[in-house]
Amino acid sequence: MNSYGDGNRRGGSAGRDRPNSGGRGRPSGPSRGPGGSGRGGPGGSGRPSGGGRRPSSIGLRELGRGEFELVHPKIVYDLMEDYHEGIELWRAGEPEDAVDALRYALEGCGDFAWAHVALGRIALEVFQDPSLARGHFGYVVELIERTIPPGFRGRLPRDLPGNAPFFDAVDGLVECLRRLGRAGDAVRLRDDVDRLMGKRKPPEEPGRERRK
């Protein structure tokens, strides 16, 4: 899958998740996450210290019949209370407070896919900022891209809970790309994801001739 979101390159720019807010006074707290701080994506530096791409904290679980489900860091489920608080605040018409709650969740784990998707939706729907939204959606898509091994020929069913934030991020990223005048990239992204869902056959491996 190609990189369409530049999520890994936005770094701390997503700190402007809202126009101007005094914040809710949440303490930043220590960073928590697998293998250390767990920071990444728009919520943190998003860059590895060694110069290469940061390894994904998300895993793959095989379910049989060629189907796989994404396995998220355990700490994500400990932070779900902050995520749900953010969603409730958004629904109550308080998007700036919702952003605070969601970014607090990202302080605990920068690879919290659900939180990135929600922040992307708020940026797109409330603040009408497709570039900022693209940073959040793109980070999730690139995170899963790093999870999936080269030559992967399995399927990621959309209806599995662990796979849901990936497909929600794809939907958001496609919308952002279209709004930003990159309709061709949006089509290619959708084609890539259709292959992961088993809707399209993967391309033939280089050098392999089809037998008649």
Image (spheres, rainbow, N blue to C red):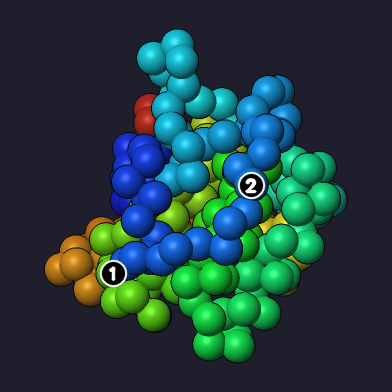
Residue 32, numbered circle: none
SS state under label 2: loop
- Image spot of residue 122 (x, y percent): 45, 73
Q: Is residue 207 above or below residue 21?
A: above
Quarter of the picture containing the N terminus is: top left
Task: Using the rendered image of the protein, determine whether residue 205 is visible from the camera's viewpoint.
Answer: no
Q: Is residue 17 above or below residue 210?
A: below
Residue 142 left/right relative to 38: left
Q: Is residue 6 above or below residue 39?
A: below
Question: Which residue is labeled 1 in the image?
Answer: 129
The residue positioned farthest toward the left in the image shown:
181
Residue 117 left/right relative to 132: right
Question: Which residue is labeled 2 in the image?
Answer: 27
The residue positioned 46% from the left and 15% from the top of the image is 49
The residue positioned 19% from the left and 67% from the top of the image is 180
- Image spot of residue 182 (x, y percent): 19, 64
Q: Are marks 2 and 1 in contact (CB under 8 Å)?
A: no
Query: Could you tell me the amino acid type at mark 2?
Result: Pro
SS state under label 1: loop
Question: Toward the viewer: 71 or 14?
Answer: 14
